[in-house]
Image (spheres, rainbow, N blue to C red):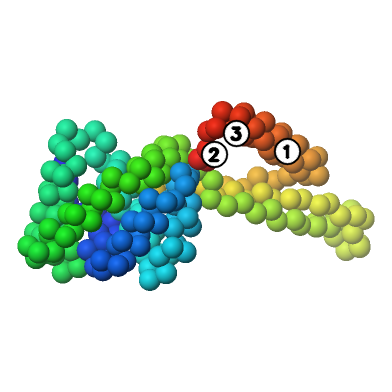
Amino acid sequence: MITTIPTQYRPGFARIKRLSRAEFEALKSALEKAPIVGGLKELTSAVVQQVPSLKRKEIEQILRTLFSLCVLLTDEEESLSENIATLSNVMQVSGRPELSLTDEEKVEFERKMEKLLNIKVVATSAKVQQLRLEYSNTFSDAKIFTDMRPIFDEPANRPIGCALAHTLKLTYHEGSDHKEFYVVLDAEDLGSLKKVIQRAETKAASLKSLMDLAGLPDLS
């Protein structure tokens, strides 16, 4: 049951509330025509060019909010219209100007929400996004720093040679935390890592061809 509006979703609800009729119809039409894609960023990219009056950030905020509701309402026993009515009531008593609704705005807001949440691609992309986040650790970024370190036989003498070392920095998400760790690699390790990545790409291509034969879209 919806009892409060989490901070991260307030901008999305506020923007949906402020959508003009033209903006709403353009967004609804773009979503209805959008292909089934893999998540928040992909769906945003699929519709952003079709709704020039909205910035990419605004569309992403709206979709993030819709995704959260799709996930929340999956196991709800009440109907969609009942849950939307509860949501608008919570907004009315939130005490936040950007979320407050007059009686007329409440009717219009509920109409917008019901139509948006009934668009198939929204529910499907929300499921894909949820599956992505169910992994305990998810990749964020990677960098490799390469160092040349001189080797001395005696501190006062010139180096007798140098050693190359590579440091792999991996950043990842663990729940809501952003973490990182470092691994030192040599030339042989780099080769092993490259082979592992190439093997994964080969397997992915093979599985992708099977998906294409079966007519299944790639939602990854």
| Residue 36 location (% of width, % of height) | 46, 44
Residue 13 vertical placement versus 197 (above, below): below
Q: Mark 1 points at which residue?
A: 198
Q: Which of 111 and 174 is in front in this view?
A: 111
Front position among marks 1 and 3: 3
**Label 3: how many Cα within 10 Å (few below 14, some 14–19, many 20+):** few
CA distance for labels 1 and 3: 21 Å
Whether residue 12 sits left or right of residue 31 in the image: it is left
Whether residue 140 sits left or right of residue 18 in the image: it is right
Considering the image in quadrants, where does the N terminus appear?
A: top left
CA distance for labels 1 and 2: 20 Å
Whether residue 87 sits left or right of residue 147 in the image: it is left
The label on residue 58 is none
Q: Write the residue at 36% across / 46% down.
A: 122
Q: Mark 2: which amino acid?
A: Asp
The image quarter in which residue 106 lies: bottom left
Q: Mark 2 points at which residue?
A: 218
Direction bottom: furthest residue: 53
| Residue 211 location (% of width, % of height) | 58, 31
Q: Mark 3: which amino acid?
A: Asp
Q: Mark 1: which amino acid?
A: Gln
**Label 2: how many Cα within 10 Å (few below 14, some 14–19, many 20+):** few
Q: Write the residue at 48% across / 57% down.
A: 45
Whether the residues at callouts 1 and 3 have beta carbons within 8 Å, the answer is no
Does label 1 or label 2 sit earlier along the sequence?
A: 1
The image quarter in which residue 104 lies: bottom left
Q: Write the residue at 77% across / 50% down.
A: 165
Q: Mark 3 points at which residue?
A: 212
| Residue 207 location (% of width, % of height) | 62, 30
Front position among marks 1 and 2: 2
